[in-house]
Structure formats: structure tokens, C-alpha cells
Amino acid sequence: MDRAMNHDDVAELLGAYALDAVDPDEAALIQAHIDGCPRCAAELAQLHEVAALMANAGSNASVELWDKIAARLDPPGDPPPTAAVLDAALADALPRRLSQRHRRVRWSVSAAVGAAAAAAIALLALQVGHLDSRVGQLDQQGLAQAVQAALQDPRAHRVALRSTSQRGTTVADIVVLPSGSGYVFDNRLQRLASDRTYQLWGLEGDRAVSLGLLGDRPAEVPFTQGSGTAITAYAVTAEQAGGAVAPTHSPVAESGPLRT
Amino acid sequence: MVDFQSASDGAIVVGIARCQEPALAEAYRRHGGSVHTLARRVLRSPTLADEVTQEVFVELWRAPERFDPGRGALRTFLMTKAHSRAVDVLRSESARRVREERTVRETAAAGYDIEHHAWDLAVADRVKEAVGTLPADERTAIEMAYFGGHTYREVASLLGEPEGTVKSRIRSGLRRLRTLMVQHGVETAWTEP
């Protein structure tokens, strides 16, 4: 079939299309129509809903299969996992480094990742960030007001994130309230390609905990680190879009060790 | 720490977008069983169903932005992905082996055991009730397409019916089902407790 489909042609095929029961050439024509036809898009959504209900199953998801899925959640893209993750030094040396002033957090990539590092990787992969889901709850105007309110709160902590390539240059600031709610603001990080994102990390002891994605361009971003956390420093890495479960690159910006 | 067990679908997907593995684990806990059962239903192979299930959840992890809460429940999104992927596998050359295993039971409509073949999943009672009230020709066309993985042209050929008749039956049957499910108060989305 090489002609465009009109609305009635498509409408008649929507049921079959919802069940993946059309040929590929028809599917392309149908989708092209649906992309510009809210009515057909709405009906397709309803038909998908019905189909999904027909397949309702009371069975439980298998734990073994989850283990296989979890094993595939390595950070996407390059560099490959064995070479990309933190080297063995991170797991045991990071807290010491952070306790020493003027020592930079260095997440170097080791070519020879040993068993100890592999263990550290596994641990870090599990230590995905724990935070509330406030993304999307604040529009930009509300966000700006929230940042201002936080800055005026005498109990808030303000932390500068400094570039790791240009010594001393502050590229963004963080303000954190006692509740654990925080904001990245005055963000002057360089814009990234659209398939990459900045990711904010909180360092808790020997763990790097994801505090959220900052996007590919400078923006004010809310995050939540929880009120009972013991974050010793912040860092920002550039990751593949979608983020990573553990840092795969050296930080582009970091805070000094936080006063406790 | 967010307790994802009491989180809405939207909050779970936001958690996934922020690389929080517990959020994905909760999505899997809620929907992994259904996703796997559907894939196994279509593919008749636990091994291939494992692979499809993994792909569905890994894709959710890598591209959570493809889920649009305005277009339906997370469950619908995952089941739609699972079915589409299972059908791709079924129709691919690499799955010829699977297809061959299935042919004995499915090459002829005459051998297509409606009662025992397609609706023996643990379908929720109310859904089952709604499905049971469908005219038999609509139900047959839908089950052959959805669980059998056949295109409507193949269904028409297997049943010896005109293609136009089959595509109309599929659409009218699904629309009827939707009306019946709404009447029966079937909830489609996971809602906050």
C-alpha cells in the first residue's frame, strides 16, 4: 500500500492497529495519520487500554527475572561499564579525600578494574538516590520564588559548585533547607549536546547518591536529599541522557567538603 | 526516602527518570507478572517471554520520557510495549522455530479452541465477564489477533472471511469491550490508596 490513508480508512483499522495486527506498511501510514489526528490518537489510547486489560494476569513477577533486568541497568552509552565506573580508589579513598581540604574528588577511570572495584560498583549501582519526586510540581515561576524563599531562610545552607577545569570558578550554587529540600540555582554550566545531561550527586561516605538530573542546559532544578542524610559533598557529572545509576565520568563541578 | 510502594504511576516514572532503581523495581513488582504472561501467551516460550520482559523494563529505565501519563496508565503503556515487542519477535525470521512450534495448534481456524485457548489467563472476573458477553465472531477475531499474534489479513484468511469484515469486528469488539468494562467499573489505572 503506497497511498496516504484518509481518516475513515485509519479509523476502520484502529482496532487491528491497537492489537499490532496490521502489516508494517499499513502501520506506518496509520501512525502518520494518528500523529496529526487527536481523535484517532484518543481512540487508539482507549483501545490500547482495553487490550491491556484483556491480558490481565494475576501472576507475580519473578524475582529471578528482576535480577536479570537489574543487571542490565548499567549506565547507557560509552564508556563501557568495565572501564567506565569508578576505580577502586573511590570506594575507600573518597571519604579520606573529602576530609582533607584542597583535595579534589577525583573519579578517575581505571583501565584495570579489579575485584574490589567491581564490588564497589555493585554497591554504588544499588545506592541510587533517595529523594522525593518534586520534579514537575513546580513551574518555573514557582521555582524562582521557592529559591528566593530558601535563600532568605536563615536555617538554609548555601554551597557553591566550582568548576573542576577552571579552578575557583563557581558554575552553580545549591541551597538546602533543613527539610532536605534543595535547589540548584545560578546555574552557569555549559550547554551539553541534547543526548547528554548533567547529573547531581550527593556523596554519603563512600557512596555517590543520585540527587537528580539537571538537564542539558543551565536551569534551576529542585531536588530532595532527605532530612536525615549525611552528605559530605556534592558533585556534578555529565552523563548520557537519562542519567546513570553511578557516576561514569569525573565531575565537571564539585563542592568542597561540607562542614558538618 | 520515597516509599514507592505507595507512589502513583506518575511518581514512579519520575523516580525512574531520576535514576532511582527502587522506582523501576516497583513498576516491575506491579506489572512485571502481567507483562511476562502476555509475552509468554503470544510467544509460547518462557525464554523469549523473559527476553521481552527484560527489554520492556530496560527500555522504561532508559527512556522513561516515552511514557505519557496523559495517554493512559503505566500498565497500559508497558503491556502495549510488551505486545508489540512480542509480535515483532514472533514475526521475525529468528523466531521461525517458535512459529513452527505453534503451527500445529494454530494453522487452521477449525482447530482454534476459543474457550480454552485464549481466555485461560487469570483475567480479572469483571473483565472476563465483559469479554464473555462479546459476540463470538468479534471475540474470535480479537483473540486470534491479540493472543495469536496474527494480522487481521491472516485472521481473515484463517477464518475464510473478508478482510474488511475482520477489521470491523476487531474494532467494534474492542469498542464494545471498553463500554462493557466502563459499565462494570473496571479500573484501568493504578490509583493512590
Image: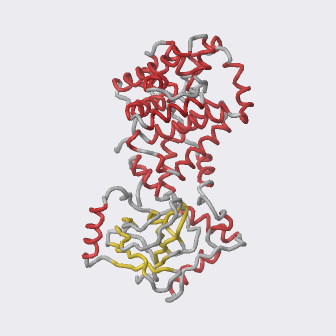
Q: Nearer the viewer, residue A137 or B20?
A: A137
B164 lies above or below A210:
above
Q: Position of residue A166 (x, y in %)?
A: 50, 83
Q: Quadrant of the C terminus of chain A?
A: bottom left
Residue A149 in which image quadrant: bottom left
Q: Quadrant of the N terminus of chain A?
A: top right
A220 lies above or below B164:
below
Q: Nearer the viewer, residue A222 or A32?
A: A32
Q: Residue furthest front?
A: A3
Q: Is residue A167 visible?
A: yes
Q: Nearer the viewer, residue A135 or A220?
A: A220
Residue A39 as seen in the image, left or right of residue B65: left
Residue A36 as seen in the image, left or right of residue A157: right
B149 lies above or below B114:
below
Q: How is the image coloured?
A: secondary structure
Q: Residue furthest bottom?
A: A101
Residue A208 as seen in the image, left or right of residue A43: right
Q: Is residue A212 visible?
A: no
How many numbered circles does the render carry? 0
The residue at 51%/19% (across/down) is: B167
Q: Position of residue A52 (x, y in %)?
A: 48, 32
Q: Position of residue B52 (x, y in %)?
A: 61, 40
Q: Position of residue B23 (x, y in %)?
A: 47, 53
Residue B150 in which image quadrant: top right
